[in-house]
Amino acid sequence: MQFVAQKYPPAWLILARLFEESGLDKGIDRAKEAVGRYLEATPRSKGQLDAWLRLAEYCRLSEDWLGEIHSVVEISQLPDIPFDQLSNAANRLNNLLRFHQFLDIYDIKLQIRKLVDTLASRIDKEGDATDCSRLAWLYRRLGEQEAAALLIEQGLQMEPDNEYCLKLKASLSQQGGFVRQAAL
């Protein structure tokens, strides 16, 4: 099957599914490798979305948190990616960072920055209050409290009772990090 996959990249995804369902020891790890081979053999495009999502899931199942972070960020870098996928990527990354401490790893900060920059470039036109809160959390994790506070204000202007913006605003206020937009 691997021989066929070298000439016909979609076969890597079939092989990944076989490894996933095999129940073999290291089946998920082999499935991750097969999806990785597919991604290497195909051009970066929106068509890779399902493969990246699958890889992120395999990483989650195998508790490969760094691999999952990488996959989630790569999803955000695909051309013409729907905005809801960007927001979902930010949400998943925030959840991973909440339960696992990776921010001391320089590469993780670079990964977060990629997602933050991509999401920030589209939030004004496509985002809602919840999306603003997700991006604000990422800014906060990068130590950029002022950017987080501005996004909270933006989110609350869209939806004054958004629970996520209100919780983050309260959290920033307790730490003395909330900057009112009028003060800027």
Image: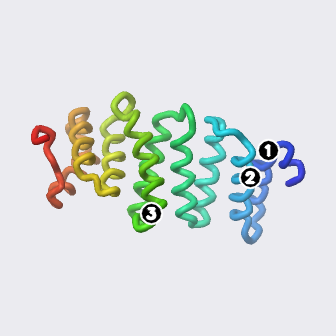
Task: Judge from the rendering whether residue 63 lies leftward or rightward of residue 154; answer left or right.
Answer: right
Q: Whole-percent x and y of residue 75?
A: 55, 44
For the residues carrying marks 2 and 3, which lies nearer the camera in this image?
3
**Of callouts 1 and 2, the N-terminal one:** 1
Q: Residue at x 84, y 48 (%)?
A: 5
Q: Residue at x 10, y 42 (%)?
A: 183
Colouring chosen for the image of the structure: rainbow
In the displayed image of the protein, which residue is found farthest to the left? 183
Per the image, label 1 sits on a secondary structure element best described as: loop
Q: Is residue 7 above or below residue 25?
A: above
Q: Tag on residue 37?
A: 2
Q: Residue at x 60, y 48 (%)?
A: 53
Task: Judge from the rendering whether residue 182 lies leftward or rightward of residue 58; answer left or right.
Answer: left
For the residues carrying marks 1 and 3, which lies nearer the camera in this image?
3
Q: Whole-percent x and y of residue 137?
A: 33, 52
Per the image, label 3 sits on a secondary structure element best described as: helix
Q: CA distance from mark 1 to mark 2?
A: 8 Å
According to the picture, the residue beneath numbered tag 3 turns out to be 106
Task: Judge from the rendering whether residue 9 lies leftward or rightward of residue 137; answer left or right.
Answer: right
According to the picture, the residue beneath numbered tag 1 turns out to be 9
Q: Tag on residue 137?
A: none
Q: Whole-percent x and y of residue 168?
A: 25, 52
